Image: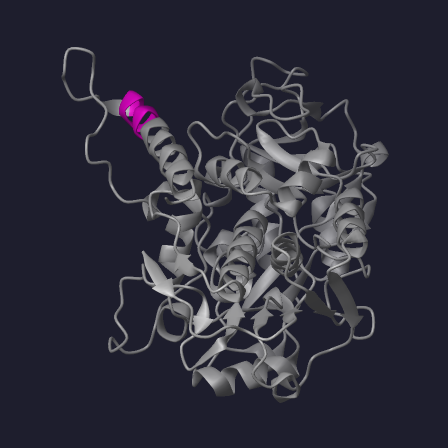
Amino acid sequence: MSYQSFAPPSLPVHVIGGGLAGSEASWQLAKAGVPVILHEMRPVQPTPAHQTDFLSELVCSNSFRSDDAQSNAVGLLHQEMRRMGSLILHCADQNQVPAGGALAVDRDGFAKAVTSAILSEPLIRIKREEVRDLAQLSDVPIIIATGPLTSQALAQQILAMTGEEQLAFFDAIAPIVYRESIDLDKAWFQSRYDKAGPGGSGADYINCPLDRDQYAAFIDALLAGEKTEFKEWENVPYFDGCLPIEVMAQRGRETLRHGPMKPFGLTNPHNPTKKAYAIIQLRQDNALGTLYNMVGFQTKLKHAEQVRIFRTIPGLEGAEFARLGGLHRNTFLNSPRVLDPFLRLKNRPNIRFAGQITGCEGYVESAAIGLMAGRMAASEFRGEELRLPPSTTAIGALINHITGGHVETIDAGPSSFQPMNINFGLFPPLEDPPLEQDGRKLKGPERGVARKRALTARGKRDLENWLTPQS
């Protein structure tokens, strides 16, 4: 799909927000020869979750998830972004830490690398200030990439421009444990199914096992533990992809052991014949290997409760925490209603949005939308025809979901549009499903694996065709 730009924009392009999406958008613009002013409010105006003033600071997990580009949608998105010169993926690759089949990073090293790259780019100027009034930027081209912690003043302006009633939902962050405080006489190193990933060995997670009784007691403690509540955020929904563990526990006592505490593909070397009923995994969080985060353990438990409850986990009885979990407000648009296919506000086409505020979820997805917003703005500056990536690619499927793939129509009443991670459910079906060599249809697990590989192969081919200059 293509579309003619609405008008040659003025210079420079203003990018608001120095997170993953804003940094990536700025980088793509600069590499296309377009001057950028990058507005980042930290440290002038702090947020509830950030701890530094580095650009692209990671405030939740340190994982960019699977790096498998053969049979995983997010792995395919990694490859597509690398192919398009992503700053975020380059810095992630340069600062990776072992994480099985995932791409995880030393969070400080990663943020420092992004910040250094942006500071060294002569076409990017950083202004450390909070943008409270979009009117001060008049009709200049703008990319808003303020992410899950958009300031209240700016959020109110965005609400007014869109005519929507709500932009917010809850998000949570997981605790980080000092490695030396974990008891490896009870815990052990192993990746699920011994799967090795970039920079990893196949034994990249620390695993803490619980038997049936321990699991039951742990669930009881989660449900009874005192939680942090924020009255001013009442009636704001959670995002299902980043639920606090105690909220998951409320949905059923077995929910956690079929989610972040699933015991499958792991064998306890301290007791090989006894299968754990549930397992808590910790993943390396920095290059030194001194910090490990509790995978999937986003929580709104009060800090004292976190220490008390998490120290009942075998192997974590003496755990010391570098950071405890917390709850913060997230923000996103009803993008199918208010954005056009090129991420522009329908009633203010000089304003684009990028990152989590558009309704994508995840580090990689946010950076990917920033990458496309930057490329689109650069094409617009050059007066080129705007071209969307095919929906058969990971990045195209994500944009399609954000701007037009939701099942509801504009007139369908209250929207249930929710943030979405990249997944194969967003891709168009295969025209020719994979078959056995004798022409029979594949069945069972083999069919699923073959389908994923066919989808990634199609996506790679279609991205290359899209990137090839048209004659």
In the picture, measured across the screen, residue 344 lies left or right of residue 82, that is left
At x 24% / y 36%, what residue is drawn?
Answer: 430
Magenta stretch, main secondary structure, is helix
At x 66% / y 87%, what residue is drawn?
Answer: 136
Q: In which quarter of the image is the N terminus?
A: bottom left
Q: By what rule are the colours in the image chosen?
A: one colour
At x 60% / y 86%, what residue is drawn?
Answer: 138
Q: What residue range appears in magenta?
A: 445-451
**Quarter of the rendering containing residue 95:** top right
Q: Where does residue 329 sit, x and y in percent of width and height? A: 61, 69
Between residue 73 and residue 414, name the one nearer to us.
Answer: 73
Q: Where does residue 210 sit, x and y in percent of width and height? A: 60, 32
**Quarter of the rendering containing residue 403:** bottom left
Q: Where does residue 395 sit, x and y in percent of width and height? A: 44, 48
**Quarter of the rendering containing residue 386:** bottom left
In the picture, measured across the screen, residue 249 lies left or right of residue 176, that is left
Q: Where does residue 244 sit, x and y in percent of width and height? A: 57, 56
Q: In which quarter of the image is the C terminus?
A: top left
Q: Residue lying furthest front in this view?
A: 471
Between residue 219 and residue 460, name the one nearer to us.
Answer: 460
44 w.r.t. 31: above or below: below
Between residue 456 and residue 276, name the one nearer to us.
Answer: 456
- Report whether residue 102 is seen: yes
